[in-house]
Image: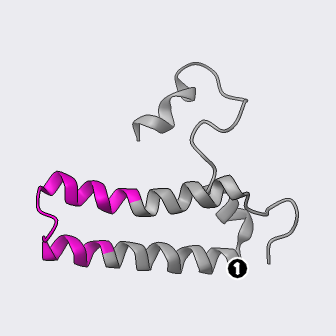
Amino acid sequence: MANGKNKLTAGQIIYTIFFILLFPAVILFLAGDWFWIEGWIFIIWFIAMSLTIGIYLYRNDPALLAERSKMPGGTTNKNGISIYYPYYI
């Protein structure tokens, strides 16, 4: 399990949940059809895979999960263009 150093913060968990729910909504919005069957199938698959990978990493490699759950631009050791780079990905 996660120890004190690698424990996820509430902000990281909220950011992850927000992204998992926002990304599929944007796809359906851009498609212009909220009843798009293939889109809903993808959303179900996307959420299932995100949760499966998150649970797996929490149990087997919490340090990697904590690293991958950091918000873009969260470190202070960056300078120049590298500060804005995560927002363009």
Q: Which residue is mark 1?
A: 60
Expressed as whole percent of the image width and height from the top left, the position of residue 17 reads 52, 63
> In the rendered image of this protein, does residue 51 appear above or below residue 7?
below
Horizontal placement of 3 versus 14: left or right? right
Q: Quadrant of the C terminus?
A: top left
Secondary structure that dominates the magenta span: helix
Which residue is most to the front? 34
Name the residue rendered at 66%, 39% in the picture: 74
> In the rendered image of this protein, does residue 86 appear above or below residue 60?
above
Is 58 within the magenta? no
In front of the other: 58 or 80: 58
Is 34 within the magenta? yes
Name the residue rendered at 14%, 57% in the picture: 31
Q: Which amino acid type corresponds to the residue marked 1 in the rendered image?
A: Asn
Q: Which residues are magenta?
A: 22-43
Expressed as whole percent of the image width and height from the top left, the position of residue 80 reads 57, 18
Q: Secondary structure at mark 1?
A: helix
> In the rendered image of this protein, does residue 13 appear above or below residue 78?
below
